[in-house]
Structure formats: structure tokens, C-alpha cells
Amino acid sequence: MSVAGTPSDARKTTATLGCDTGSSALRGVDAVIAELLIQADTHHTNLATRQLPLTACAGRVLAEAISAPHDVPAWANSAMDGYAVAAADLLSAAQQSSVSGTETSAARIHLPLDGRQAAGDSLCPPLRAGHARRIFTGAPLPAGADTVIAQEQVMREGESVYLPRTARGANVRAQAEELSRGQCVLTPGTRLRAPEIALIASLGYARVRVFAPLRIGLLSTGNELCTPGAPLAAGHIHDANGPGLATLLRGWGFEVIAQGIVADQPAALTDALLSLSAQCDVLISSGGVSVGEEDHLKAVVSTLGELSLWRVAIQPGKPLAVGRVGSCPWLGLPGNPTSAFITAMIIAKPYLLRLQGQARVQASRYALPAAFSWPTAKPRRQYLRASLNDSGHVTLHAQQGSAMLSPACASDGLAMIDAGCTVALGDAVAFLPYAGLLS
């Protein structure tokens, strides 16, 4: 990406910034997210917590610090199957061999065996000086040994072995090399995925304290909507946002209370919002936030609480609205399906995760070469359905309409182009994989 008058990887143009009527009133995406995170930080401290079995904690957010109750590893142990020795014995045997003239061409050292040590053995007697012990992966390193030689490098003859010279400490997992007793391992606000749960289990914890999931009230607005499975009347469409957004929200770890379709009429909207706000921590709607004469939702929210933000410099998704119904936060997503999904993933997700108590909330993005050009700067930040080719370059889907859902199914993520920027072939462009946005 390029800016006029600067190197070719940052081309920015201002000539087109006025082409979107009213663009000067739009709020920038980053500014909106930052403001929402500040709001969330003042609310999430009131979240309820519960202690759950570790097996029930997938996707939950940790509400307590986890410390190591012991060193990890708790004792020095072998990193592979082989033979435990004292490095000093290898040196001593090698020197004696050299003095006596018996050193082999392969420079191997002969040591007698002193038993075997397997993982789980309750006894681990010290290694006899000048000996080697058969040892297996994970077995405790006996006192007197400081090195393990891989079995592939050793020749065994009866009850003795021929060993190569090996550096002291090779193939040994030192005590506390990963964690020390009392060390903080995970902090509150950590989302518990498989790696975190495995780590907690390895420390011996069977239960942990987590935040209770947010309860999110979800409704789809629009007189043109009908329930999937119902026959379509003239001028109607099936509701895609309700099922899709519910799936998205549940994938982020939230409890969803779905109201279904609500007619875009002030009385119906008022009843639905008041009912949901009494049951939920957050309200999310789709549709009814544009400038049409049939879009009544913003006015209803203003009457019931406050409309604090409307219209963001994002494409697709400009008519995003934020407010509250009574004291319950409300996010009004656009009605076009792709606009709804992109604003949910980019703007709503970090806000909701922070409300949930999660510390890290922003999706990862990667600077990758563009296999396309974007010659005309736009006044709003672009989020384009994109994929990676076999060379790791970003390609754009041919269709980018905000009402189209199929391009999302045929792409790997979103390419982000900032407002006022152009992209030349080969420029670095921000790529956000769906893997980080959907989960």
C-alpha cells in the first residue's frame, strides 16, 4: 500500500476522500473499537464467575491466575531413549584410552552398564561412577548422571556399551527448565483453548474459575424477512443474519437468546428490545439502521435509552450503530448479510470479548504480498473477501457485494485496505484469516 510522495509500499491518495457523501461525519474503525473497549473495561468487572471442571472450560475466559504448584519438569529427566552417563566419565575413559593406546578409530568410549531406568519407576538409585544406565524418555535422571546419549549412537555388547563423546547436558530436560514453582502461568482474561487446558491439567488442576458467558439477545429486523423453511412471498427473503450471527456468537463462547424476526415497526421493536434487555447482558440486532423511511430502530433505541454512535468509515458496513436500551448495551449491525458479518467480526467481536473479561481481543493480521492491484483509493477502510494462492499471495474474490454470502464461503479471510490507500501488485497488504475471526 502506498501514500503519495512516499515509498511504493505506502501509497495514499486524498483526491477521492469526498466521493462518499457525508464521509466527513464517519468515525474511523480503529477509533470506534478503541472507544468500545474503554466502555467494555468499565463493565466487565461486574461479570459473575463460576468454578468448573477443566473438561467443561473449552472456550471460557479464565477468571483467576494459575500458578505452577511445582517445578516443570519436577525433576531432571531424559529427553529420549538412550543411556545416561556422567560427562566427566566419558572424558576420563577417553583419556585413559588415549594413554593406553586402545582408543578406537570411531573414538568410542567403553563403559559397563548399571541397570535401567524407565518412566514411572518408583526407585531411582544413583548412577555408579564410571558406568552408564539404560534410560527411557521421561525417566528421571539418576543422581551422578548429567548427560543422555541417544540409543542410535550407542553400540551395546552384553552388559557394556560403546559411546561417542557427547557434550555435557545433552538430551536432558533440566528441572524447572519450563516453569518454576510459584511462577504465574496464565493470567485472568486468558481464553482457554486446548493448549491452555492441557497446560492446566499438566499442573494438576481439576477445576478452575472462569467468567460466566455473556448472554446476548439477538434479533433480525425487517418487514421483508421470513424464517428459513417458510415459503417465500413476493418481495420477501429468508433471514440469513439470525442463524449466521447466532452461530458466530456461540463460536465466540457466548450464550445466545434469539428473538427471531421482528417487524420494522416501532411498537414491535420496542416490545422485543425491552423483553431481551431484561434477560441479556448485550443486545445485537441486524437491519433497520440505515437512512430509509422504514428503518425505525435507531429512533426506538434513542427513546428507550441512547444512540451514541452511528455510521463508521468501513466498507461494507457503514450504517453500524451503537447505543443502549436502558442500561443494556446495544449494537445495531447493518442488514446486508456481508455487512453484518464483517462488522460483527471486526468491531463487535473485540468489544464483546472484552465485556466477557478477555484480555487479548484483536484478531491477528499478516502483511502479505498482493496478487492484485487496487488503483482507486476509497474514503472508507475496505474489508474484501480474499484467499491465499499457492505462493502465499493475497487474491481477491471476483464478487464483493455486501448482500452476497457465497464469496465468504469461497475465500480464506479478509484483505484490509485503509481509507485513502491504493495497492499495487506485490505491495504488502493486511490479511485477516477467517480462522482468527470466526473462532
Image (tube, helix red, strand yellow):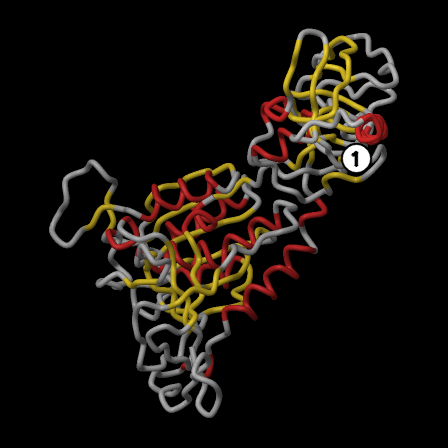
Identify the residue under disc 1. Answer: 168
Q: Is residue 125 left or right of residue 18?
A: right
**Picture coordinates of residue 382 (x, y %)?**
38, 70
**Picture coordinates of residue 303 (x, y %)?**
50, 61
Query: 402 or 262: which is nearer to us?
Result: 402
Query: 366 or 43: which is nearer to us?
Result: 366
| Badge 1: residue crowd in 10 Å (few <14, some 14–19, many ≥20) | some
**What kind of element bears circle 1?**
loop
Which residue is depicted at the point 50% across and 55% down? 348
Q: Is residue 431 left or right of residue 294?
A: right
Say if residue 69 shows up in the picture.
Answer: no
**In the image, is residue 312 above or below residue 7?**
above
Q: Quadrant of the N terminus?
A: bottom left
**Picture coordinates of residue 138 (x, y %)?**
69, 21
Callout 1 amino acid: Arg
Give residue 111's quadrant in the image: top right
Q: Is residue 62 left or right of residue 429?
A: right
Query: 64 or 85: which is nearer to us?
Result: 85
Which residue is depicted at the point 78% across and 23% down? 85
Which residue is depicted at the point 46% across and 76% down? 26
Q: Residue furthest front?
A: 101
**In the image, is residue 262 above or below residue 307?**
above
**Picture coordinates of residue 344 (x, y %)?**
44, 54
Say if residue 281 shows up in the picture.
Answer: yes
Q: Is residue 281 left or right of residue 378?
A: right
Give residue 184's quadrant in the image: top right
Number of numbered callouts drawn: 1
